[in-house]
Image (cartoon, coloured by chain):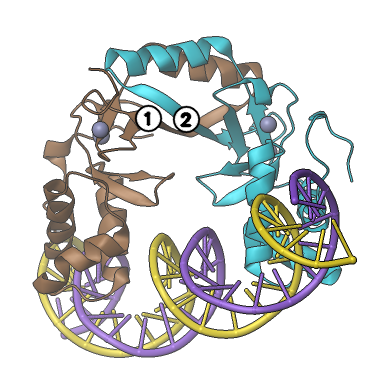
Chain colours: A cyan, B brown, C purple, D yellow
Amino acid sequence: MSAHIHAEQPALTKNQSLVYDALTRSKAPLSAYAILDGVREHGIRAPLQVYRALDKLLEMGLVHRLESLNSFVACSNSECEARETIVFAICEKCSKVSELADDRLEAQLNALASADHFSVHAATVELRGFCKQCRPTG
Amino acid sequence: MSAHIHAEQPALTKNQSLVYDALTRSKAPLSAYAILDGVREHGIRAPLQVYRALDKLLEMGLVHRLESLNSFVACSNSECEARETIVFAICEKCSKVSELADDRLEAQLNALASADHFSVHAATVELRGFCKQCRPTG
DNA sequence: TCTGTTGTGTTACACTATAACGTATGCAAT
DNA sequence: ATTGCATACGTTATAGTGTAACACAACAGA
Ligand SMILES: [Zn+2]
Ligand SMILES: [Zn+2]
Ligand SMILES: [Zn+2]
Ligand SMILES: [Zn+2]
């Protein structure tokens, strides 16, 4: 049960811990069924058990969903709770996911929306490309 | 991301036209299966026929995929072909989707990625909220 | 004509997610 | 302790999204 930056959260239940640990062990995002495969040996048998744990973990902010991959990652950025908008940089070669944050980007998005009289409740920002290690030459 | 111009695209095949027309008729994004329901009477019977048409329409830039909805919309912005990054503003009340574009946002995203030594190939930006007509006051 | 490419039609299947039901556990208020 | 409620758990079945594999048709160019 990884000690984590999100301190004031309630303790995780058994299934939540199993799912969360599976995600923290993984270097790449995992689909719900990939998680299921990883926790079968620990007693979880059905997709719904995984999805229910994921729902809670998402609520707590310990886990993020990547819409463009139908997959999930453990949060890797202690600051992201305080933000409306998280930018996920997803490497197409090694599958590593970085969480980027930037006040100016958030302001820019809000300005763009305001210009269209659109009030933003939530934002999904996912970049695909190559990470530092995988980009061709430096 | 290659820039194409709609006018220079090859003519649409029968299935592509049927799928494209279904999307242009709809005021809201449609899932592939919702499209299928709309074109059954015109002879399309299987999901794959829809997905194949969608693949081509996406390539041509006539249609966009909304990752956060697993759905598709007809392009409504003649400028969007020239851009790397399109921002979709999705109304959670009336389902209307606006395509927003902004050079500064694109620059900001690239700057943020560069700071992490990440090279961007494609970006998904989807906002959820209320459109002008649906936001509480005015 | 031959041949490669693209589009099409069909069946079957894989992957993603939820509905509906019942049980178990913990805890608060009587 | 018992009742009542909330939350988590376990299971089966089903809904929704997306592809694999194979065969055929149309067509363009050598
Ligand atoms: Zn995070
Ligand atoms: Zn990488
Ligand atoms: Zn467009
Ligand atoms: Zn609206």
Question: Amino acid type of disc 1?
Answer: Gly
- The answer to whether the residue bearing label 2 lies less than 8 angstroms from the nearest atom of ligand 1 is no
Q: Position of residue B90 (x, y in %)?
A: 33, 35
**Looking at the image, which residue is at 79% across and 30% down?**
A6
Q: CA distance from mark 2 to mark 1?
A: 7 Å
Q: Which quarter of the picture shows residue A134?
A: top right
Using the rendered view, name the quadrant where residue A64 is placed.
Answer: top right
Apparent side of residue B37 relative to residue A56 in the rendered image (left or right):
left
Dot 1 alpha-carbon crowd within 10 angstroms: few under 14, some 14 to 19, many 20 or more: many
Under circle 2, the secondary element is strand
Q: Quadrant of the C terminus of chain B?
A: top left
Q: Quadrant of residue C26?
A: bottom right
Name the chain letter of the residue that bears numbered label 1.
B
Which image quadrant: the N terminus of chain B?
Answer: top left
Q: Secondary structure at mark 1?
A: strand
Q: Position of residue B119 (x, y in %)?
A: 57, 27
Residue B75 visible in the current orientation: yes
Q: Residue at x 51, y 45 (%)?
A: A67
Task: Give the residue pinned by disc 2.
Answer: A122
- Which mark, by number, is residue B48? none
Instruction: Report the residue at 15% width, 55% height from top.
Output: B22
Mark number, residue B129: 1
For residue B135, above or below residue B126:
above
- What amino acid is found at the position of numbered circle 2 in the picture? Ala
